[in-house]
Amino acid sequence: MKKKITISFFGILIIFIISVLFYLFSGRYSVNKITVLGQTNLTKDKILELAKIDMNKNIYIMNIKTIEKNLVVNNYIQSATVRRKFPQEITISIVERIPVASIPVTSGYVIIDENATAISIVQDEKSVKKPIISGISISNIKLKDTIPVKDKDALENILKIIHLISSLDLLDNISYIDLKNYDDISMTTNTGMLVRFGNTDDMQYKVKVLNKILINLSTKGKTLGTIDMRFDTDPVYYE
């Protein structure tokens, strides 16, 4: 009697599993909604174009890993995670590489993110992401890798300056940064004001002071001139 009950139970269980699988993998579960999370610069349409999702395909036999690989082909996408959401939704979560600056190279300008990863190379200065950082020699660039700077100190200084300026929302106000001489770093704002920043000592403090000076000058309608911060005295502004 117990044996018959056991057989009947497993028989029902098998039928139930087969029924569930048949239901899930039927045409009833094609994709009807795609949610995209984490995008900043890339549009949803661009992400969907990269993902190459067949909306008519059953969501449960879709190869999620293939969709993720399709997405990270784009240099501006650092990582992508794709998940199924019952009953018919696909969720795409991406982490973008955000352009923060550009560096002149032989073939044009290499656009980098906050980690100095090379995202793309453009020829036209109108297509660059400012600020443009000059005074750095790089070659043999490989996209999606850290820019190949011979001098490690140069790379550290690039990252430090970008992070400090970005933390105070100054990045979009600076057009050019000249790092040819680390004892005499200079910057140019979008309005054409020259900043003689000096050396890399106390950079965090100096960037905060620079931010206050630019705000103060802006309230007074001062958009041109020179801010001299090279010496161990108070910064000097002159037109």
Image: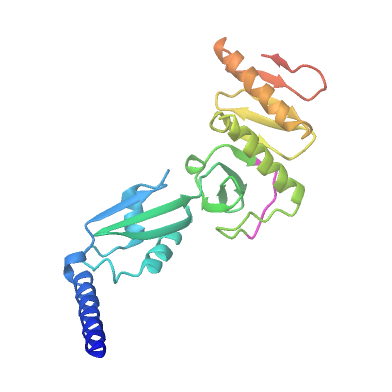
Q: Measuring 21% from the left and 65% from the top, which residue is drawn there?
A: 29
Q: Is residue 156 left or right of residue 79?
A: right
| Image: 229 above or below 112 | above
Q: Is residue 139 covered in magenta?
A: yes
Query: What residue occupies the far left of the structure in this picture?
Result: 28
Q: Position of residue 229 (x, y in %)?
A: 75, 23
Q: Is residue 126 visible?
A: yes
State the residue in front, 198 or 1.
1
Q: Is residue 64 covered in magenta?
A: no
Picture quarter with the N terminus: bottom left
- Give the main secondary structure of the magenta stretch: loop
Q: Which residues are magenta?
A: 134-140
Q: Position of residue 110 (x, y in %)?
A: 57, 50
Picture quarter with the C terminus: top right
Q: Measuring 37% from the left and 55% from the top, which residue is drawn there?
A: 92
Residue 186, by quadrant, is: top right
